[in-house]
Amino acid sequence: MIKSMSVALEKNRGKDLWATLQKMSLRDKIGQLRQVDGSGGRSDASLLEAIRHGRVGSVINVVDPDLVNELQEIALHESPAGVPLVFARDVIHGFKTIFPIPLGQAATWDTDLAREAAHLAALEAYAVGIRWTFAPMIDVSRDPRWGRIAESFGEDPLLNALFGRAMIDGFQGNDLSAEGSIAACAKHFVGYGDSEAGIDYGSTNVSEFELRNVHLEPFRAAVAAGVASVMSSLSDVDGIPATAHRDLIRGVLRDEWGFAGLVVSDWDSVKQLSVHGITSDDKESAYQAAEARIDVEMTSDTYENHLADLVSSGQIGIEAVDSMAMSVLKFKKNLGLFDRPYTPKNYKSGISEAEIKDCARRQASESFILLKNSDSVLPLNQKKLSSICLVGPMADQDREQLGTWVFDGDPARSETPLKAFQDLLQPDCEVLFEKGLATTRSSCAELADFAVEKAQHADAVVAIIGEEAILSGEAHCRANIDLPGEQVELIRRLKATGKTIIVVILSGRPLTIGDLLPHADAVLFALHPGTMTGPAICDLLFGHKAPSGKLPFTLPKSVGQVPIYYSKKNGGRPATHDSIMSIDDIPAGAEQTSFGMTAFHLDDGFEPLFPFGFGLSYTEFTYSDLHILSNELSRGGELHVSVCVRNTGLQDAFEVVQLYTRDRVGSVTRPVKELKAFNRVLVRSGEAQTMRFSLSREDLSFYRRCREYGVEAGEFDLWVGGSSQADLHVTFEIDA
């Protein structure tokens, strides 16, 4: 039997909620724990009937404000308890106006802009009655094969924590009950980003120390940031499905961290417990989810069908149901739904579409990562161009540039690269256009011939290629992460014309692009930048802005290197450039040997194509004068770090200054580098700026062999630079 979950605290806080709960029948309380899919709308008679009888607490996928108010009216005036509904929707990276996918937002390393974008998305969603979004996704994601890496903030716990917090602040604001605020939901608790083979819904086998030091860290930060809700993962965690994981949800999230908000299952995940094989039927699934303290069951009906019987049989105490129902009531009260349940007609946020698109353009511009720029072919000199050829299957795709997980994004608002080029350049510069390929997955045919022909008559060629939106996202995992179709062949043929070839890649994930690089003079990599993709590309290609994006992931040479990430463990035999050899270096008939006996691949070595944190600019930055005020970090003190960053080029530009540390000796093995701080700063041409960072002992703490968090005495390395391969280095010590 589930132990009683006391709701005494709620009696002392808000007697109105306690009085409401006391008046509710058991069936009414269970109804509050049920979330239903409302996409059937008015034609779904069962939905209306369920609301009328108090069998529904929240509704997902209704975005018609008139229908929202109709359903709310039924809940308030026809259901037994008269408790308002809360309406939810996946507002992942925008609502009508679409911002870069979360992975692209992470590439900006600009948390302030992420907060602004989330706030604007909340305003658009609030206008149609949405009060709850299932974002941010803060799963640390180190496998680019996984489709949902698009929804993450990349491979690093700190990036996920800081961007997650920014989005929570943007969605919720300072007052969750205020107009324009919607409840955020940190997902997926926990470990989902480590699915085996990068396959969605797969098992995650994560050690206790890896779980604590990597995957739980962003969620701990989200709880500290006041996130209103948390969603359990679809996957199992070391043999126990997250939706039934009492030790994680009640133990870590509730008891250890003190999370007092609402916990919701993922879609149908309670019912799927029996598919996992952890339960034998729906009734047992309802029991295990309730025991773990899943407050709301999303879309499936095991609570509806079995929770009352579990209470009457004594397997679940009524106090447990009261506690779960109180979580829902408190959630609704915090949203202000008891005072303002209806969606205002013709709600005006005071923010215009133009202002929202301006933010989307700024964020898209900041998200582009310059990977190659041979002979400084970029930026293009607009005044010297009489013609330019725009090529590629992604050059005029208003829907595809929005990326994955876009239910409400309006393609009519999209400004494609073709449109942006025409608006900016014509009539002074002729814009020639050919797709070259029908889709990103097509083979070269006569369309490529047309593209090559037009390229020969242009001063420069810009190819917009990549992945269609449908190739990434939930359930869209790939075993091969090369550019799909014959896009590399198209670029090879264009390069053979002798023209300057600039390639812009629009993708939902990291891709293996080593075969492409030799055929491109410049490469800009972007993660589906959203509504304002076209103007953002023009901003960068023509030098109105300098690229400032940095990789939020490690870009592998081949899929065989996956998983590859900068904060790996050293191992007992780490590879060095002197210890490796290539497969081509092995003579035929060679005797068996271990070639230096270090950790590397014969065919791809040990280094990535591009490291985490990497990104070029149109200028050069030099780092010098790295100083630590004291080489010892004493108890209660801080480590004060300063470094000089100088712009030695001709263009003002932003640089993302990154600070990494390494704990040389720990009670459990520690990563070779960990990102501990960063700052995105404008450095004007010829100028230098002194950047300052402060680190506390808490910043250097980790989950130790003694099963407690803390810092350990010893020597540390510290690096500062423009990527994870920063080489400006000092050491310091932490005393006992």
Image (spheres, grey):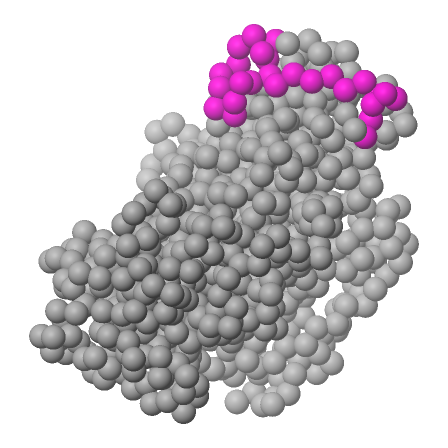
Q: Nearer the viewer, residue 65 or 287?
A: 65
Going by the picture, which residue comes out furthest to the front?
A: 77
* Residue 367, x across and y down, in percent: 66, 47
| Viewport quadrant of the N terminus | bottom left
Residue 254, quarter of picture: bottom left
> Which residues are the magenta region?
424-449
* Residue found at x 59% / y 73%: 175
* Residue 405, x across and y down, in percent: 48, 44
Q: Is residue 335 above or below residue 241?
A: below
Q: Is residue 548 above or below residue 628?
A: above
* Residue found at x 34% / y 63%: 78
Q: Nearer the viewer, residue 132 or 621?
A: 132
Q: Is residue 372 visible?
A: no
* Residue 416, x across and y down, in percent: 66, 31
Residue 115 within the magenta-colored segment of the rendering:
no
Is residue 28 toward the left or the right of residue 354 in the image? left
Q: Nearer the viewer, residue 263 or 671?
A: 263
* Residue found at x 37% / y 89%: 11
Q: Is residue 660 above or below residue 455?
A: below
Is residue 245 toward the left or the right of residue 232 in the image? left
Residue 374, quarter of picture: top right
Q: Is residue 540 visible?
A: yes
